[in-house]
Image (cartoon, rainbow, N blue to C red):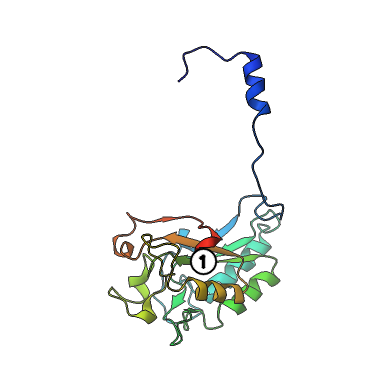
Amino acid sequence: MFNGQCCTPGVLLLLVLHLHPAAALDNRVADTPPRGWCSWQRYRCHIACDDAVSRECFNERLIRDTVDAMVVGGYVKAGYEYIALDDCWQGPRRVDGHIVSDPKRFPSGIKALAAYVHAKGMKLGLYTALGNNSCAANKFVGPPPWSADLQMGLGCDERSMPRCARAQRDIEDFVSWDIDHLKVHFISAAAATLCPHTSRSHSHPLSLFS
């Protein structure tokens, strides 16, 4: 505890000399904080449409129009390079368990959308949840209990980490779609029905998926 008296200069110098530099990867990734546009701030889970072109709806047209507007408006040149699809982009899983985008609102698929975003000089981000489902899952797959094809999350249980039922397969799908950023919503298998009070979003170590 401090007693109100400052350390002597000699002590301060000793403390500085014994500090070790923090280890960091010299790969130029995240040299600056990620900047861009996220669908959740304005559109959340507005999916009261059944197509890819309706305005004021979270769909393919919205993302392409937003990308175009950010390029024309000079935002990309100013460093706002990310466009992130938050919750509710998903559709029911395929019979083989692979995750897919909603076939009506994102019929071209995420890989094609990523190609469009990259062609404009931007980067694409996606959302997933740590547990079996996301907070907004009831909006697009219905209320729990969820069958296997309606479980959109990575299937991790905080009590048995790092075992995650679908993480490896989902991450491989995301990589194959050429996405650049992944938001992992920290929702456990049991807490998804209690959102937003029991959830938080942050990046998880990659070892979680190994």
On the rendered image, what quadrant is the N terminus found in?
Answer: top left
50 or 91: nearer the eye? Answer: 91
Q: Position of residue 65 (x, y in %)?
A: 59, 70
Q: Position of residue 63 (x, y in %)?
A: 56, 70
* Occupied quadrant, residue 144: bottom left
* Occupied quadrant, residue 152: bottom left
- Type of amino acid at the residue the image marks with label 1: Phe
104 or 12: nearer the eye? Answer: 12
Which residue is found at the position 51% from the left and 56% from the top? 203
Which residue is found at the position 69% from the left and 69% from the top? 120
- In the rendered image, the residue lying farthest to the bottom is 95
Q: Position of residue 86 (x, y in %)?
A: 48, 65
Q: Where is residue 206 in the image (x, y as percent from the top left)?
A: 55, 61
* Occupied quadrant, residue 200: bottom left
- Kindly identify which residue carries mark 1: 209
Label 1, secondary structure: give it: helix
Tell me if I can see residue 177 in this picture: no
